[in-house]
Image (spheres, grey):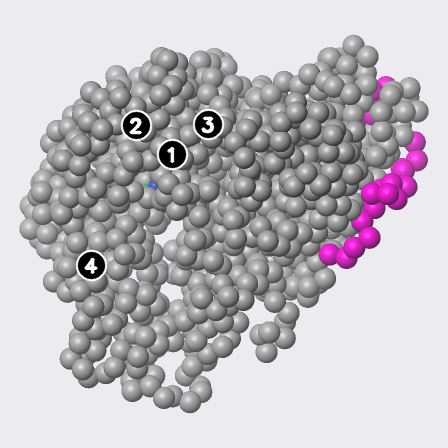
Amino acid sequence: MSWERDAPHASAEPDARVARAFGMLTMLSSTTEGVSVATSFSPFVARHIGPREADIAVMLQRVAKASLAELTDTAIPASIRSTAPLAIEAAESEAAVLEQLRGYAAANKVVTSMLGQGYYGTITPGVIGRNVLENPAWYTAYTPYQPEISQGRLEALVNFQTMVTDLTGLDIAGSSLLDEATAAAEAMTLMHRSTRAKAGSVLLVDTDVFAQTKAVIHTRAEPIGIPVIEADLNDAASVEDLRTAAGGAEVFGVIVQYPDGLGLLRDWSGLAAAVHEMGALVTAATDLLALTLITPPGEWGADIAVGSAQRFGVPMMFGGPHAGFMSVRKGLERTMPGRLVGVSVDAVGYPAYRLALQTREQHIRREKATSNICTAQVLLAVMASMYAVYHGPDGLRAIAARVHGHAETIAAALRAGGFNLPSDRFFDTLTVEVGERCGPYVAAALERGINVRRIDSEWIGISVDETTTATDVTDLLAAFGCTSGEPSDSGIPADFARTSEFLSHPVFNAHHSETQMLRYLRSLADKDFALDRGMIPLGSCTMKLNATTEMAAVTWPEFTDIHPFAPSDQSQGYAALIAELEGWLCEITGYDAVSVQPNAGSQGELAGLLAIRGYHRSRGDDHRTVCLIPQSAHGTNAASAVMAGMKVVVVGTAPGGDIDMVDLKDKLAQHGDNLAAIMVTYPSTHGVYEDTIAELCAMVHDAGGQVYVDGANLNALVGLAQPGKFGSDVSHLNLHKTFCIPHGGGGPGVGPIGVRAHLEPFLPRSGQRGRAGAAVSAAPYGSAGILPISWAYIRLMGGDGLTQATKTAILNANYIAARLGEHYPVLYTGASGLVAHECILDLRELTKLSGVTVDDVAKRLIDYGFHAPTMSFPVAGTLMVEPTESEDLGEIDRFCDAMVAIRAEIQAVLDGKVAVADSVLRHAPHTAQSLVGEWEHPYDRATACFPQGLHVAKYWPPVARIDGAYGDRNLVCSCPPPEAFE
Ligand SMILES: Cc1ncc(COP(=O)(O)O)c(C=O)c1O
């Protein structure tokens, strides 16, 4: 069978009626004219910003500035300062914002979805919704780089990995990727490098892989020169068949969908054998729920499995966020993209989790990068893993059997009604031939509140899911003029039926009552340090308040239960909200257009660079492929450039930490003719406003290149300077930093890109007029379901509030630099002697003299009740501190006091009073358990555990310092047996 299928993209243009209803057209067209800017702050602003007015006075005194205005005027180069205030009106109150969100929600239309294609209705168990998705202990945590304070979420992720390996029948799984489509693209490059594919070798993709997955595969393959051929691989079972499908070329990899995009169960074992015979690899894009009943891909020969864990309790959310997954056969794990959690031991030999293969964990090895993924989908992976923990293998099988039973019932009734269904080998998705009457049947189903998939004019797709009821079945059949007979339940055809066990580990068989589950979730959350416990001063990460009101709409059904490919009149609330958010982001950044499709900063980088590439090529400048990247850049920058088919050329750092302008001139002279772009972070990753930025932009433009400003540090610019106005052509923004989407323990994220007008045509296609760029995410609006968070933040703060937040973030960082600069050198400051919104404390000399490392300081901070600052980025041996505007003076002082006290502990080592190996620093963090055993340290227990005096709210790390190298030597990435913890 071969059918024409449209790329299933809903439109995001809100229709004029909806836009008028929300006053949006007025708002958008008047952002630069006429909207009155609030002159005083709303109460919410004072709740978001930590320091009180009196505190601000104290802090200003410490940094020797008379006012916030003087501080920011001095810190930020005048040449880039915005002249006009942000034209964004603040909402009256939190209640008013919720009211407005309710209006948007009401403009979405929730119907029963039977559209499938990777997005299914699912029931989020209440205990998981309330205690994970809505629980700040889970959603405000950071990526578990500090494993001693992250054991809870690391355990949840090991459960996720075990769940994926068991269900797919493969050996090792990572702890989440961004979505199914990007996971498939990652599998493509993994297969390419693992097979050491020769130039010109081809990736074969079966025709019946989901359309959005194929689109992202094409996006990612083209710039790096991987030929992709789509072919009907249904009957391909020999090397010859594959070669023929590849047009005679060598094949390095094959991607198939299982069950396929039309719902058919296809036996791919012959294909897999043929692929292996030719030295190539097979990836199966697959469905976890189906795998509870059908033979897992690992058992029929797949080397890699990818997919989405969405239907394990994570709502559709108009396309995301959802946890993509990847599992691989042994031997492929060391080149896998994304984070891998492994088991190791702590200082006393107790089992402990941490990110495995840490040194290469980011696999973002600059120009040698194999992937750019950084922020992933931890919160959603935790939810999916808990869904499996809660239901257990029997519960999952029962859900899958019910789904399959409904599908069988529908199939039997449709056949009895005279419809042709080409196969009875399916799990949950049916393909029905309807003659030329597709339109009327789709309409009849919709009249009964059901979306079915219009494959083409003659074929309709119907996907059943966990939420499907007997009434839905009856209604659907009525739309086809059929009545349901007896429920059918003959089970999965025997040749596809799964025989192997899965999820036999006790964790999936022990928490099936709500009480047990509640306590399990609580016990894990208690092990972790998140923003709900204290400050997380991570430089470059902007761990600020994720206000409760901002989070509210994320779980409203009118936002959660919208399928990304639903007819556009069902998502008008989303369209209006997205359009308004994009308008505000344009106002804030000075760009002309924004796309919210990228679902992490890394994907924004790729989308932005692809826009630049598209622009050059549209002008016949195909040779412009050089991307200049400063030495201090975040690893994702170079990785994204490589993925966009560019050649990375590094620009050096001047002694003061700024970009070396002399080196830049040299590099421009050398590469100007082939220059595609420069990627710079502003303010720089050194936490400084470089005053050469405008000059840099001009120089690059003069050479014919484009300027990409990495917007990860936008929290230092909002309201004060606009990259789109000071010379940049494109930026990604991390909504999970500046715009309050919580980090979720390592994701989700949203990485929209803003561009100047000339790049707009190259933005990712997403139903919006005039955008023809390639898709970078599976869903048209990426992680649409969490956009209400950033929308609410901006609406609550208004332009003035946002600007005040930026000023306060700068004040907080400079206050810390002033207080701690007396104890640890602050590595870089701007020409004004000030830092931006973060500061780097240089411990290298202290380490050289005392042997105390940044690791020791980071772990000792845990004893003091803090998450460590960012370690050794962008300079090895340093700590980068970013307090954000949300931390108040009390918490900032507590942190500074801890750092000062730690400095005294280092001094004791320097003075020879204690050997570093015996010091309280080296043995940190100290656990509660350590107090009851032998005490062989030269310091007492109180010094170890209560360095700032006894207090009841003490955070106790569950494990002592973890030996990362041990875990890498003995790689274990799934749940250890319970005896290991005895
Ligand atoms: C400067 C910078 N650029 C890019 C990124 C990548 O963003 P994401 O993690 O959302 O992919 C980060 C993430 O921390 C960053 O700090």
Q: Position of residue 765 (x, y in %)?
A: 49, 21
| Residue at position x 78%, y 38% in the image | 270
Residue that numbered label 1 is attached to = 641
Looking at this view, is 494 or 397 the one in front? 494
Q: Is residue 687 magenta?
A: no
Marks 3 & 2, CB-CB < 8 Å contact:
no
Type of the residue with mark 4: Asp
> CA–CA distance between discs 2 and 4?
31 Å
Please state which amino acid type lies under the numbered disc 2: Ala
Mark 4, residue position: 842
Instruction: Determine contact: label 3, label 1, CB under 8 Å.
Output: no
Q: Quadrant of residue 802?
A: top left
Q: Does label 3 or label 4 sit earlier along the sequence?
A: 3
Observer able to see residue 25: no
The question of residue 494 being in magenta is answered with yes
Q: Quadrant of residue 662?
A: top left
The crowd level at tag 1 (other Cα within 10 Å; few <14, some 14-19, many 20+) is: many
